Image: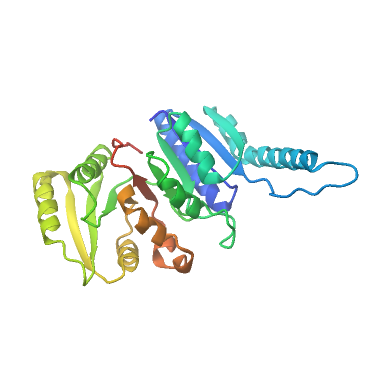
Amino acid sequence: MNTVLFPTDFSKNAQQAFRYAKAMAKRKRAKLILLYAYDLPLIAPASAFTTRGHALHLIDQSLRDAALQQMEQYTNELDLLGENYAVLIKEGNAANVIAEFCLNEVIDLIVMGTKGKSDDREFLMGSVTARLVGKVKIPVLSIPESAAIRPLKQVVFATNLIYNSEDEIQKAINFAMVNSSSLTFLHIQTDIEKNNSKLNELSKILEFNKNENVTLTIIQDNDVVHGIGHYLKDNDPDLLVLSTHTKSLYEKLFHKSIRKEMVLNSKVPLLIFSKEIHPIVFF
């Protein structure tokens, strides 16, 4: 791992995500990039003394100056530690800015907060992450505000069995192996969903990797999010993993109507990875 990207909105949750990003970059001697994106107003006020274009320029400069000042809460700490980092302030939609940046730069991991400054704001780190998942093939690590930085001893891979390929499943196993973690494949089975053939395929894969501390857990629940939430509450794993095939499940986890459910209230970081990526060693 050479480069970690940390997009921020300067919220309290982003501060916790920064601690994760900093810890990963430090351990891997990777460069940490701090990124803030902002939107300019669609309409800028004009007056007898200034044009709308000049007013937009003044607003843009004010937003940049304010962002740089807020960045100091991170850079002052990084300077004291002598860390390798860069600061970027860019205008535009957060998800689009992050995706475009990742297309033009070599980024190994994106670390973000689960939610932003307010549940009522348009700019929520959780919603930005949900939109970002479909735009990049880079692993995205979403950090809840109450998440503790600890070794990855217990990793849970939530699978729907239908879309997760054998290659993705094997990558999850490899990921756990290189991090010296136990791995649980978690499947929430609803009454209308029967995947016996896929279960048999997964069982064969697990049998082949039986010495790697890999297990399969099946929970009967008509609400997938509810089932995952109960599992996280009862078992307190160190990391929940989804693949990009389960993006719709990620969006459900962070939908406004269930933000107060157990999943969002848990302390479990969430890693979303693409089938194209290779395993990452975190700690």
Write down the quadrant of residue 219 in the picture: bottom left
In x, y percent, where is residue 13? 53, 52
State the image coordinates of residue 203 (x, y, percent, origin top left): 11, 53
As drawn, 242 above or below 220: above
User: Which percent across, then down, holds residue 84?
Assistant: 52, 27
Which quadrant would residue 55 be assigned to in this image?
top right
* Residue 243 visible in rendering: no
Q: In front here: 55 or 149?
A: 55
**In the figure, is residue 212 to the left or right of 81?**
left
Quadrant where the image shows the N terminus: top left
Residue beneath the point at 38% across and 56% down: 250
Q: Is residue 251 above or below residue 4?
A: below
Point out the image quarter for the C terminus: top left
The answer to whether residue 187 shows anywhere in this view is yes
From the top left corner, tell me how far across and down residue 65 is, in percent.
Answer: 71, 38
Identity of the residue drawn at 64% across and 38% down: 72
Compared to residue 170, the image places residue 199 above or below, namely below
Q: Residue furthest right?
A: 48
Q: Is residue 123 left or right of residue 99?
A: right
| Front-lying residue, 27 or 206 | 206
Task: Give residue 217's quadrant in the image.
Answer: bottom left
